[in-house]
Structures are given as structure tokens and as C-alpha cells.
Amino acid sequence: MRRRGFIALIGGAASWPLVGRAQQGAMPVIGFLNGGTMKGYAPFVEAWRVGLRQTGFIEGQNVTIQYRYADGDPARSAGFINEFIRLPSAVIVISGGDAAARQVKAITRSIPIVSTFGSDPVETGIVQKINQPGANITGVSVFAAQLVEKRLELARALVGNSRIAYLIDPNNPNSKADRAGMSAAAGKFAQDYAVLRASTDAECDALFISLPKADAKALIVESAPFFNGKVEQLVRLATQNRIATVFPRREFTAAGGLTSYGSNLPEAYRQLGIYTGRILKGDKPADLPIVMPSRFEMVVNLKTANALGIAVPTDILLRADEVIE
């Protein structure tokens, strides 16, 4: 073999690993942004990956995923979104709050977006119609206007006409709508209630200590990204302070909370993963209808009820989708 041919062969062989890396780098990139914490949303993110796998996409094999968490600080989201655009991302996934969905839509009109929606996406102007979202965004809704009223009904079943406290996160963009829903439901039942606010760990601790001053016999926790990431803390505080609490998700009750009523969040994230995969295969967000919640779960932890000395009415136990004993 001539020296020039040998050198060319060696040079080509040396480049093989680089070619392999280039091919790996050609995999589509998903920019995944969550408004909460990695720990708090871990089971839901895994459910999203399940949906993604169901459409044929496996992380590290035929798709690359860049994860970013805002840790409850909406101000961080814009920087992450711009980072996703620079990568570039084949699709951007938004979860854990609606503020980032509005941000990403304002920043890019070309990259497909898949998002969860905690409020009515049409009312907030994120999409044009439920069946035809339009533009470059679609996703899965976990919002249902009747949830606040249903949680109030559950709390009343536990404590009768006693005063009830409603815990909200003032930084949650949906808190205004949630307060309006509580006001309407309370007016319907002539229910006395107090609105309490917390947006940090310290404020949650202080709030539960001050609950006796509110003279409330039950507490309803708003469905908010911040609270969804504080399952262990809120369950612990509710148990220590022996307050009958209605939580927004099954995950709270499974962790020892008394009761919960809400949409099935893991299922919503699985659907989000399926939509992500469909878009990677070529579907357009504008043509994919918003997936609306079809299943709501009432869960009762009877073991916690017994420990708190709370008698759960028989009709609630019969209506519950799950009773934890």
C-alpha cells in the first residue's frame, strides 16, 4: 500500500468516532421546562417519558432531552426558553404552570410547543379554540372549573357548616380564578371561609401555626405548582396540626394526607408525552386538539382519618375512587 493511501485510510479511521458522535448529535432535541422542582415533579416527568416511549421515542437512543426546572421562580423560565431555542429544540415541552406557556408562545412562533394547562387556555388567550388550538401550541388541560366546588363539598362533608380555610399561592397565575370559584361555591352553600396565602416553605409553616386564629375546622389546598412540589411538607403540617385537609391530588393522600379530589396528573403527563412524540413524527400543534381531563379522583386515607379522630361519612367512602387503609 502506498504511503499516501495508508495515511488516508488511517485518517478516515480516526474520524469514525467523530462521525458517530455527529450522528448522535443529529437526534432531535426536546427542551423540557417545568415550573416546579425536579423532586416534586419526578413521578409526573416519568409519566411523560412513558407517553413518549409509547410513540417510539426513547431518551438517549433516538431523542435527546434537555431538562430545566424553574424551582417555582417564573423569572427563570424566559432564560431557559431562549436556551432551548438556541439549541435548537425540535419541540419545547412546558409543564408545572401556565406562565411559561405564555412566555414561550410570545418568544417563538416557529418551534412546536406542547404544554400542560392549569387554567382555561382559551380564556387566557394561549390558544384560539380547544379543538383547533392554532399557531404553534397545543397540550393537555388539567383544569376543570367544577373542581373548587367539589373540594368544598368534600370539606363540608367532613366538618359540616364549620368555617373552612382556603390556601392559595398568591404567585400562582390561576389563583384569581380559583378565588372566584371558591367565592361562587361558598355563596351557593352559604359557607363561611377564609383565604390564606403562602408561597414559601416558611410561610407554609407559619400558616399552619396560625390556623387556630382563623377558627377553621378544615383546610382546602389550591392546585398550584408550588403546592404540588411540597407534598411531604404540607401533609406533615396538616397531620401535626390535626386539621381536616382536602388536597388537590392523589399524591398528597397517598403520602398520608386525609382526602384529595382532582384530575389524574400522571395520566395527563402521559398524554403530554404522546403529543410530544406525535409532533416529533410530523403532526402540527395547530391540528392537535387540547386534551381535556376526563377522569377525576376522590381519594380518602382512612388510616389518617382514624389517627385524627375524624369520622368520614359512609357516603363519601362509597363515592371514593380509592380508600387507603
Image (cartoon, rainbow, N blue to C red):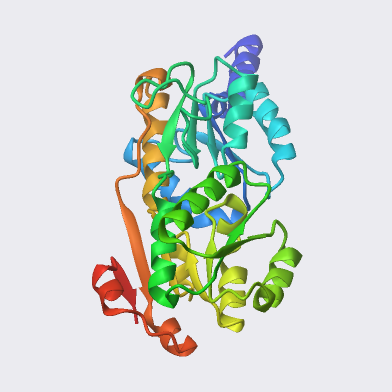
Identity of the residue drawn at 50% across and 22% down? 112
Position in image of residue 146 (x %, y %): 39, 49
Q: Quadrant of residue 203?
A: bottom right
**Residue in the foreground of this view, choosing between 137 and 64:** 137
Q: Nearer the viewer, residue 288 or 173?
A: 173
Query: Residue shown at 38%/32% (left/top)?
Result: 275
Is 121 placed above or below 135 here? Answer: below
The C terminus lies in which quarter of the figure? bottom left
Residue 137, how many percent across, how many down? 48, 24
Q: Is residue 62 above or below residue 228?
A: above
Q: Residue at x 41, y 55 (%)?
A: 188
Residue 163 coordinates in the image, percent (x, y): 54, 71
The N terminus appears in which quarter of the rendering?
top right
Nearest to the observer: residue 35 or residue 50: 35
Q: Is residue 230 above or below residue 88?
A: below
Quick check: 75 left or right of 231? right
> What is the tally of numbered marks visible in this picture?
0
Q: Position of residue 47 (x, y in %)?
A: 42, 50
| Image position of 161 (left or right of 12) | left
Determine the residue located farthest toward the left in the rendered image: 318
Q: Is residue 193 visible?
A: yes
The residue lying toward the viewer, choosing from 84 and 317, is 317
Q: Is residue 179 above or below residue 119?
A: below
> For this view, does 298 lie left or right of residue 309?
left
